Image (cartoon, rainbow, N blue to C red):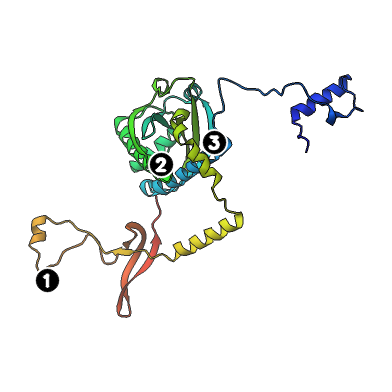
Amino acid sequence: MADILSQDEVDVLLSAVAVGDLDVDSDIGSTPLDAPLLTTYDFRRPERVSKDQLKGLQSLFEAFSREIGILLPPFLRTVVRVDLVSIDQLTYDEFILSVARPTSMSILDMDPLEGRVVLEMGPAMVFPIVDRVLGGKGVTLAQPRELTEIEERIVYRIVLMILDSWKRAWSHLIELDMKVVNQESDPLIVQIVAGSEMVILVGYEIYIGEAVGSMNMCIPLILLTPILDQISSQAAYQRHMSPEVAELTRNVLTDYVCKANVAIEPILGKTTISLKDLAQLQVGDVIGLNSKCDEPIDVNVGGIPRFTAKPGRRGEQSSIQIVSLVTDN
């Protein structure tokens, strides 16, 4: 079978016909092409990761995004969605020059892999998280600024949670022992490899309630070299679900989740007593609560307040009547 011509080769043939350098009546298929085939190559940005390896990396980082999407919502008390938007190969200098200032950059160790990586979280992601942790509604700042010491400690805790998600997502490939080496706000003073070294830049969009921010992971290619073959093998044997199978799987999982048992705890009231009084309690003693009999009580689901209700009886059983749903402010 004859080789299929590329678009460049088709353009060359059409140009030759237009200027009369090629006899259109000749048998083109029998004429050997002695001219070498040339391909553009930029030595400043060598493509050193194959398509199979990129597919494997995409699978790993999609699993990582799902882990974060499961871990953060209970901590931040709001809906969190993490979308993988890009995986690029570029030089470290190009990454550093693309990062806005100020930002939150964490330098990480990835033992047993030799080298360090950078986790960069933009202000549009960091400040809604800090606001949620401190009891706010997750608003971002109109004008970004550097983090205070208290805010840095909050971000440090979030980074540790992200590292736990990273380790779980990669656990079937390699057991990582990750730790935070340093945190910086100025990208120009962060130097983990030479500026000309190739890195893998993984970009995410993070939806925290109504706020949208960005998170980037910069991984030197030399750090991934020992496991690139394993990553490409994973891509080769990865099983892809058809849309029909994916929909069926989703329905089955939804059915199982809806049938799951959860603990419901009506809280009749609370009070505070000293340890001394607690030790002296006797049968028949009465403890006063902070609630009134005609006021609705809180109903916890899985330890989280979800409803308000009125206590009472139905037949011979103690019961509650749901009054309202507790919304997350």
Residue 254 in sight from this viewpoint: yes
In-image side of 294 versus 185 (left or right): left
Front one among 294 and 89: 89
Which quarter of the figure has residue 112? top left
Mark 3–mark 1 distance (CA, rounded to whole Å): 67 Å
Helix, strand or loop status at disc 3: strand
> Which of the 4 quarters of the picture holds residue 28?
top right
Residue with the mark numbered 3 = 86
Q: First in sequence, mark 2 or 1: give its number.
A: 2
Say whether residue 208 is visible. Answer: no
Residue type at the position of mark 2? Ile
At which x and y percent is residue 120?
43, 31
Q: In this view, does 20 lie above or below 161?
A: above
**Secondary element type, mark 1:** loop
**3 or 2: tag closer to the N-terminus:** 3
Per the image, the residue denoted by label 2 is 174
Residue under label 1, please give it: 284
* 116 relative to 11 in the view: left or right: left
Name the kind of residue labelled 1 in the image: Gly
Q: How crowded is mark 3: few (under 14 residues within 10 Å), some or many (20 or more)?
A: few
Answer with left or right where residue 242 lies relative to residue 211.
Answer: right
